Every structure is written in C-alpha cells, then in structure tokens.
Image (cartoon, rainbow, N blue to C red):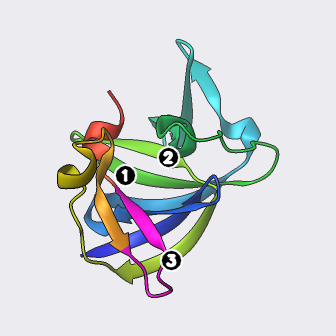
C-alpha cells in the first residue's frame, strides 16, 4: 500500500495514504482547548488534535515551534495528529504483528523500509477512543 512516513519520538511510523486528507503546518498558538481537549480551526471547521507520540505512549512532541500536523479520517470524521517530522510517501508491504505480539491498539502491523529499518503502521481507527 502507499503510506505517508512520519517521525514520532525519533521512530518512523507509516500512515496508510487512504486515511490521509492533507498535511499542514501550525503554530503552537493556533491550538485551542475545548473541554480539556486540544483542537484547531481549519477552514472554519473545528478539528480534534492529538499528539501521535502521546497516543502511542512515546514522549510527546515539543510544542515550541512550527508543528507538522497530519489531517486524517477517523471513524468518518477528520482529526489532526501532531508529528515530529514528515518524511514522505512510500510503497510499503504490511506485515501482521498479531502472531508475534497479539493485537496492539493503534497499530495495524509493521513494514521493513528500504534501509532495513522497521516502521510501525498506524491504524488510526483504533488509535483514539
């Protein structure tokens, strides 16, 4: 499948391209809070905002400078994921993890990149509750 590769807490993650709507850059002051949850305004639409590293149990992104945000479809609605860096698109092959570690919430599987590095594939439909 085609995937968008992003960096999260120094690790490379793959987001299936069919889930990605767009990627944007935001400034920390654009993040607002509604009912103790981060949101951003994007073209007159309020979108929930999640730190992808925090969702996966990694160290949250440093919010001191411009932040890359991936806008994805999650259960029929748009949401934004803050990532550390955008790497680019790549064709990947999904390898299931269930036989090795069981089902992991938010992870669809893994892939081996051209440089031999393993990248986890994000399952955005189970990542956020």
Q: Which residue is mark 3?
A: 88
**How far apart are labels 1 and 2 at the CA level?**
8 Å
Quadrant into which the C terminus falls: top left
Q: Is residue 23 visible?
A: yes
Q: Earlier in the sequence, mark 1 or mark 2?
A: 1
Q: Position of residue 121 (x, y in %)?
A: 35, 60
Q: Which residue is mark 2?
A: 81
In this view, the mark in front (1 or 3): 3
When the figure is inspected, residue 9 is found, relative to residue 126, above or below; the finding is below
Does the stretch in magenta take in 108? no
Q: Which residue is mark 1?
A: 72
Asked which secondary structure carries label 2, the reply is: strand
Q: Position of residue 99 (x, y in %)?
A: 17, 53
Comparing 78 with 105, the one in front is 105
Q: Earlier in the sequence, mark 1 or mark 3?
A: 1
Residue at the image position 55 percent from the left and 36 percent from the top: 54
Q: Does residue 47 appear to the left or right of 33 in the view shown?
A: left
Does the stretch in magenta take in 114? yes
Q: Does residue 21 appear to the left or right of 83 in the view shown?
A: left
* Residue contact at pointers 1 and 2, CB within 8 angstroms: yes
Residue at the image position 64 percent from the left and 58 percent from the top: 25
Residue lying farthest to the front in this orientation: 100
Q: Position of residue 86 (x, y in %)?
A: 58, 68
Residue at the image position 56 percent from the left and 44 percent from the top: 53
The numbered disc on residue 48 is none
Asked which secondary structure carries label 1, the reply is: strand
When the figure is inspected, residue 50 is found, relative to residue 84, above or below; the finding is above
Q: Which residues are magenta?
A: 112-121
């Amino acid at each position: 499948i085609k995937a968008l590769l992003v960096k999260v807490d120094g690790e490379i993650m793959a987001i299936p391209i069919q889930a990605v709507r767009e990627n944007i850059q935001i400034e920390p002051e654009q993040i607002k809070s509604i009912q103790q949850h981060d949101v951003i305004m994007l073209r007159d639409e309020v979108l929930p905002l999640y730190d992808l590293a925090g969702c996966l149990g990694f160290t949250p992104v440093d919010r001191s400078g411009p932040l890359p945000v991936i806008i994805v479809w999650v259960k029929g609605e748009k949401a934004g994921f803050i990532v550390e860096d955008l790497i680019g698109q790549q064709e990947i092959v999904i390898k299931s993890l269930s036989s090795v570690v069981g089902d992991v919430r938010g992870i669809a599987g893994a892939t081996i990149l051209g440089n031999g590095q393993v990248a986890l594939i994000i399952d955005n439909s189970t990542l956020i509750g």
